[in-house]
Amino acid sequence: MSEMVAEVYYQKFHPEGNQFHPLHFFSGPDSYTLLDNVSCASYGVNVAGIIRAPRGDGKESIVLVTPYDFINGGDYEALSLGITSTLFSLLARVTWLSKDIIWLVADSRYGDYRPVAAWLSEYHSPSFKVSDLLKCGERNTADNFRRAGTVAAALVLKVDGRSERFEDTLSIYAEASNGQMPNLDLINVVNYLAVHRQGFYVKVEKVVSLLSSSWLKIIGEIFEAVGKLAHTLNPDWNFGIPVADYLEGSATLASSLYSQALGIPTGPHGAFRDNQVDAITLKVSPRFPPDSKTRQHDFFLRGARLLEGTIRSVNNLLEKFHQSFFLYLLTSPSKFISVGVYMIAFALLVAPLPMVAASLYIEGCKALTKSTDNPTENLKSWKWLDAAKQVFALHLFGFIVTLLPYFICQVPGQHSPSNRSIMWGTTSSSLLLITFAAIPGCSPFTSRHHGTHWAVLKSVTISAAFIGLCLMSIINFATAEIGALLLVPTCLMAQPIKPALRSRRIKSMLGAFCSMVLLTIGFPVMFFAISKGLFGEGLVGLSLGGEFWTWLESLWAWKSATYLYIGMVHLPCWLLCLCILFHPS
C-alpha cells in the first residue's frame, strides 16, 4: 500500500465477546462487550490504506474489504488479497476518481464480522481506551487512525474454497442484522456487470432441499399448465412460468425470507448496514484449484474488472443510492418481490384478527351477562378485566423467560448447551406454575365460576397477537410474516376441546384436532425441530434442547429482534391458546 502512494495505518482492536446481556438489544452497534481474558497477544490488527481522489473534495469514499488471516491464511484468501491489490494499484494511478478509496484488510482470526465492526466503530465514533492499550505498552491508536469522507458504499470480496467445474460462480450475500437489506440498485449493478460483462454465473443462497420437493413440483406444474391454457385463450397473456424456474425462485425466496427472519448478518457487510451504509459480500468460486497457473491470469482480470466497474458506477453517483428498494425479498439475482407486494400477504393474514376479536368480545359479554342474575352488577364489575389480567401475567412471564438466559450464563460450571437448556426449561416451567398459582383465573384448569369466559379470553389474546405482529413487522418483516403464518391460525382455531369431546360430532372433533396440531407445531422448540428437518439438517432427539439453546445463543449474540419476538410475543400467545384449549367450559 505504501508503494502505491496510499496513506497506510494499522488499527488494533479487541475481539468482541458474544455474551448475552438484555440491555444490548437496546444499544447501538458501537456498544459491544469485551472479553474478560483479553491479553496483548489476542489483539487483532487491521491494515487500511486510503487513496485520495484527485477530482474529489474528500467528502465521500468507497470501501473495499478483504478478510485475511495473517497467521493461518490459505491460498484462496491470498487470491482475494491479490485481486484487491491489483485493483488498488490501478486506482492509485487513475484520474477519474471523485470519491476516496479505502482498502481495509481485516484481520479474520476472530471472524470476518468483528474486525470490520471494530474499524467502523472507530471510523464513525472514536474511542480513547488509553488504559487498555497502555498495559500492552502501546500508545493510543486513535492518534494514527486516518479517515476519508462519508462511506457511500462498500464491497467485501472473498474467494471461496469450492472450485466449480464448469464456470466461475459469484455468490451475492446481502442480508444484514434484523432483516436489513442494501439498496437494490447496488445488487443490480453487480449482477449486470458480472453476467453481461465478465461472464460470471451469479447466484444467491437458496434452500437446496426445496429443489427436489415433490409437492412443490406439483404446484409448479399446475401453475405452468394454467399459464399455457391462458396463453391459448389469449396470446397476450404470458404469465406462465416453467417448473424449473418456479422451483428455483421458491427455494431462493425461502432462503431470503429465512435469512432475514433470523436477523443474523450473512457476512461482514452487515457491519456497514448497522451504520446505514449500502454493502454486499461477493464470494467468488473459481473453476480451478488455487495452485493452477493456467487460468489465474484470466480469473484475476475478470474479478478485478468486476470490482472496477462497480466502483466506477458508485463513483459516478452524485448522491447515495436511494431511488430503488430497501425492503424486498430476492427470488433470483435479477428478480425480487417488493414491499408493495409482500405486505398484501401479511395484511391478509392479520386482517381477520381485529374483526374476530370484536365478535368474540361481544359474544363473551353476552355469555357473562346471562350467567348472572343482575346484569347491571355484571357490567359494573368489568369481568373482561380478568382476561386482560391473565394476558398481562403471561406476557410478563414471557419477559422474565427472555431474561433468564443472562442469569443462567452467570452460573459457574454450566457450560454445556444441554445443561443450560435443561436449567432454562426447568426454571421456566417452575415460574409458569407459580404464575398459574399466584394469579387467580390464570390457570387453564380454573373452575368456570372463578375463571373468565373463553370467548373474552380469546378476544384479548387475539388483540395482543395482532399488536405484537404489527409491531414486529416494523422491526423485521420476515419474522412477522413467519410468526403470522404460525400464530394467526393457532389463535383463530383455538377453542375448548371439552365441549367438542362431549358432543362427539365430526365437525367439532375435527376442529379440536386441528387446534391441537397447530398448538403442537406452534411450540417454539417443536417448530425449530420441524424447520431443521425441512432444511435437511436433521436433529438427534437427545440433543434437541442443546441445539435449540445454541440457536438462541446465536440470536441474542447478534442482538436479533427475533429472540425478543419468540420470548415476548409468540410464547405468551401460545400459552394463552393452550389455556383456551383446556378451558373448563
Image (spheres, grey):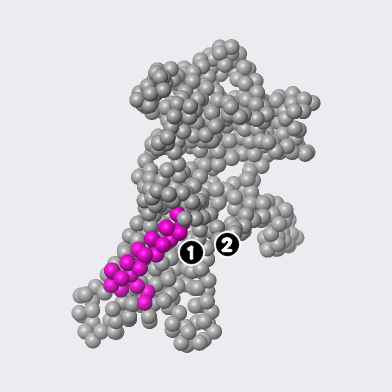
Q: Is residue 246 left or right of residue 346?
A: right
Q: Which mark is residue 523?
A: 1
Residues at marks 1 and 2, CA–CA distance in whole angstroms? 16 Å
Residue 107, image x, y percentages: 54, 28
Q: Is the stretch drawn in magenta largely helix, strand or loop?
A: helix
Q: In which image quadrant can residue 379 be found? A: bottom left
Residue 17, image x, y percentages: 44, 38
- Residue 74 lies in the magenta-colored region: no
- Of residue 127 and residue 225, the one placed in the foreground of this image is 127
- Of residue 139 and residue 443, the one placed in the foreground of this image is 139
Residue at screen point 55% across, 31% down = 108
As helix, strand or loop, the secondary structure at mark 1 comes to: loop
- CB within 8 Å, label 1 to label 2: no
Name the front one of labels 1 and 2: 2
In the displayed structure, 143 sits above or below 383; it is: above
In the displayed structure, 567 sits above or below 88; it is: below
Q: Which mark is residue 376?
A: none
Q: In which image quadrant can residue 536 be found? A: bottom right
- Residue 431 lies in the magenta-colored region: yes
How busy is the neighbourhood of tag 1: few (under 14 within 10 Å), some, or many (20 plus)? some
The quadrant of the image that shows the N terminus is top right
As helix, strand or loop, the secondary structure at mark 2 comes to: helix
In the displayed structure, 492 sits above or below 48; it is: below
Residue at screen point 39% across, 64% down = 429
Q: Is residue 193 visible?
A: no
How busy is the neighbourhood of tag 2: few (under 14 within 10 Å), some, or many (20 plus)? few
Residue at numbered disc 2: 541
Residue at screen point 42% across, 58% down = 423
Q: Which segment did they paint magenta?
A: 420-445
- Of residue 54 and residue 231, the one placed in the foreground of this image is 54
For badge 1, the amino acid type reads: Phe
For badge 2, the amino acid type reads: Gly
